Image (spheres, rainbow, N blue to C red):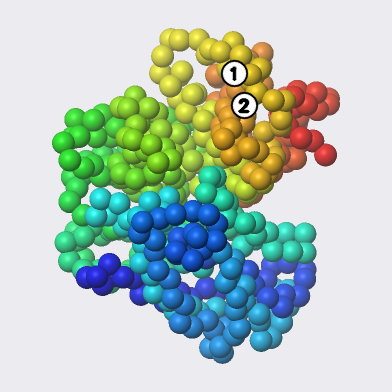
Amino acid sequence: MSEKEEFEVKAKVNVQNKSEDIWNNLVFYFIPNIFTKQTLDSLGQSSAYPGIVKIHTVETDGETVDFSLEQDTLKIDLNNELSPNSEVNVSFTYNLTLPDKGLRYTKNNGNYYLAQFYPMLATYRNKAWNKEDYRFKGETYHTNFSDFNVTYKLPIDYTLVSSSPNDPKEVKKVGTLQANNVKDFFIAILKEHFLIEKEVENTDIRVFGYGDDKELSQEISDIASDAFAYFGKTIGPYPHNQLDIVLDGKSMEYPGVVTAYTIGDFDKLSPTLLKSTVVHEIAHQWFYGVISNDPYHEAWLDEGFAEFATGLYFYSKSNEDVPYSDLYEMIKRLKPLPVNLSLEQYDQSNQSSYIYGKSNAMLWKLFEERGGIKEAEKFLKTYYDNYKFKEIDSEEFIRFTKYYFKLEDNSVFKDWLEVN
């Protein structure tokens, strides 16, 4: 990072062909290109301060290769075909500046959020690259678990927060970060903040706050630590020794990091909603961070489960009954669509009602007559043990649930899941 807010990036990706097919090309997500003026204009979006991206070189095993970049799809034509069980090293050099109001990938209040800032290899499914068009609502990328090694050089007076468990305790201008077996790698470069730390289950939970919100930040630290302990005990072990919560920007989850402040382009969340949102994003460390799913085609499997786990935490802390009737009344107001459709099959104005809302309600309904909260907790623990660091889809969820509850047919799923 230069003093002029420009980033120079050198990325090297070791790609392994674990399919049974011969590959003649590779497909990457390159999301920084979405937030350039040219791409935003072509998509009918506007930004007073778009980002800039300039790719200098693309090479495979040291040889220059042809590539195309359209919106966020970066396609590379291989000089030599890649046979099954073979690998290739792909190198990129490029420069970028971050946009204002760039959703996850953005700068805000003097802070820089490098989300999906590097070429991210798409998954390969059914003899094709599983790459969908970028959407401004919902997670439209899907990646496999990978190992990361990141070397950085920053101007002085910044703090670095990342998906790595070895973030420097003190500001360093140059350093190296590592993270293994994570779905993506996030970096936040922060200015002027205060820090609240608490150790829970040998994990350092760090809250980065701003302005005069020290009392609220302390409350968030307390509830985050409590929820973290609950999820670890109830679901399964958190895989890292650090969890960072940055109280700025769009509320999102990343491996080892949570950001929380707003939802969409709205104003700051109320204290109550902010606390609930932080717990929801922490739950994603298990449902997305450990148990993987395709967030474009199966978004309910992380959003619905994170919302359900959030509710489990809050109801486990109170003597209140779960408001089943309220949840089911909400469902009645929706069109009878399943919750496991791809993002493009929902109207963007109400996709969250299905992916977050209806899926959460139907999970509660699944347990209402099958042991309630205690049985739900046992279910999640078994679910975690079976699928940690694996990928799940709706078909596998149904298979597992039928086995767990000894169900004879799919009748409990017919009102909410599209079943093949």
The kind of residue tagged 2 is Lys
User: SS at mark 2?
Assistant: helix
- Which quadrant of the figure has residue 206? top left
In the current view of this chain or complex, which residue is farthest to the bottom?
A: 63
Res 162 visible: no
Query: Residue 338, percent across and down?
Result: 71, 32
Quadrant placement of the N terminus: bottom left
Left or right of residue 177: residue 380? right
What whole-number distance in Å separates the C-alpha atoms at marks 2 and 1? 8 Å
Q: Nearer the viewer, residue 23 or 318?
A: 23
The kind of residue tagged 1 is Met
Q: Which residue is drawn at 69% across and 41% down?
A: 345
Q: Which of 49 and 145 is in front in this view?
A: 49
Residue 330 is marked as 1
Left or right of residue 112: residue 11? right
Q: Residue at x 60, y 22 (%)?
A: 361
Q: Mark 2 points at which residue?
A: 358
Q: Nearer the viewer, residue 292 or 237?
A: 292
User: SS at mark 1?
Assistant: helix
Disc 1 crowd rating (10 Å Cα; few below 14, some 14-19, many 20+) is few
Cβ–Cβ under 8 Å for marks 2 and 1: yes
